[in-house]
Image (cartoon, coloured by chain):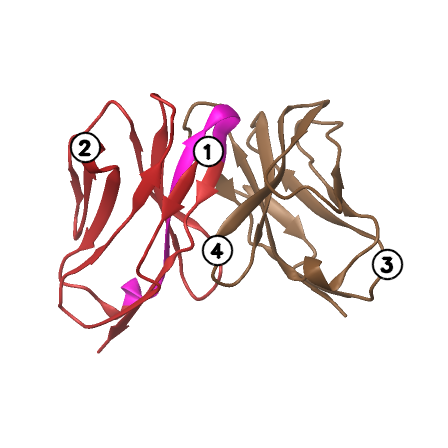
Chain colours: A brown, B red
Amino acid sequence: NAGVTQTPKFQVLKTGQSMTLQCAQDMNHEYMSWYRQDPGMGLRLIHYSVGAGITDQGEVPNGYNVSRSTTEDFPLRLLSAAPSQTSVYFCASSYGGSGTEAFFGQGTRLTVV
Amino acid sequence: AQKVTQAQTEISVVEKEDVTLDCVYETRDTTYYLFWYKQPPSGELVFLIRRNSFDEQNEISGRYSWNFQKSTSSFNFTITASQVVDSAVYFCALCYNFNKFYFGSGTKLNVKP
């Protein structure tokens, strides 16, 4: 079972470059979200989606864009990378919106130099 | 506003010792969910337990047990007879509207042989 798949696993960007982190799930989950994990700060919510075509901001949305055209995919776009976006990014999906277990991808380690 | 505090940044124990990881949360919602996730050195997030705000029963699963007390807004996690494989970072999280997770900063547990 694939679950939640994130690509790439590692990425180095130069300041000002753009890129898209990919996230796909094969569990037909309606809810998907993106988190970033920084040392000593746990995971913080960037953006989330409650279904295809519906997205909203989380706790730390600045510098990131998302869209959700299908149930399976939820890409995260960095328009102009900054060193402050160096982090580990996790995509998660869940079946429902009321305290259901979130399944996480393996993470993408992004370094912006 | 939601807040989760894991005051213990890092704990070191010797194998077979019992260890308790503390979690204190704040929320104004009357319906909420609390989770514990484990992050081993490999980096993935592993679901351990979910508890809703109306269920204060303690739970035991093998060597793991959880103590939920609404009166003190705490959801503590105890590992009995710890093992080296328990070494990981443990996150407590509060789940609220649209299955958004608010994570604590994590507790790193080192179990030495």
Vertical arrangement, residue B106 with respect to residue B42, above or below: above
Q: Position of residue B66 (x, y in %)?
A: 20, 43
Residue A80 lies in the magenta stretch: no
Left or right of A66 on screen, residue B102 = left
Q: Mark 1 and mark 2: span between their CA atoms?
A: 18 Å
Front of the two marks 1 and 4:
1
User: Dot 4 corresponds to which residue?
Assistant: B44
Q: Which residue is mark 1?
A: B1
Q: Which of the two discs, 1 and 2, labels the residue nearer the N terminus?
A: 1
Span colored in magenta = B85-100
How far apart, in angstroms, are the residues tagged by discs 2 and 4? 32 Å
Q: Secondary structure at mark 1?
A: loop
Instruction: Give the CA distance from mark 4 to mark 3.
Output: 27 Å
Residue A94 location in percent, x, y?
A: 50, 31
For this rendering, which residue is in front, B76 or B39?
Answer: B76
Q: Answer yes or no: are tags 4 and 3 on the same subunit.
A: no
Any mark on residue A17, and which?
Answer: 3
Residue A111, image quadrant: bottom right
The CA span between labels 1 and 4 is 28 Å
The C terminus of chain A - image quarter: bottom right
Q: Nearer the viewer, residue A4 or A67?
A: A67
Three-letter code for the amino acid on which mark 2 is drawn = Ser
Distance from disc 1 to disc 3, alpha carbons, whole Å, reads 34 Å
Q: Is residue A4 left or right of residue B63?
A: right
Dot placed on the residue nearer the N-terminal end, 1 or 4 = 1
Q: Are marks 3 and 2 on the same chain?
A: no
Crowding at label 1, few (<14), some or many (≥20) Cα neighbours within 10 Å? few
Say whether marks 1 and 2 touch (CB < 8 Å). no
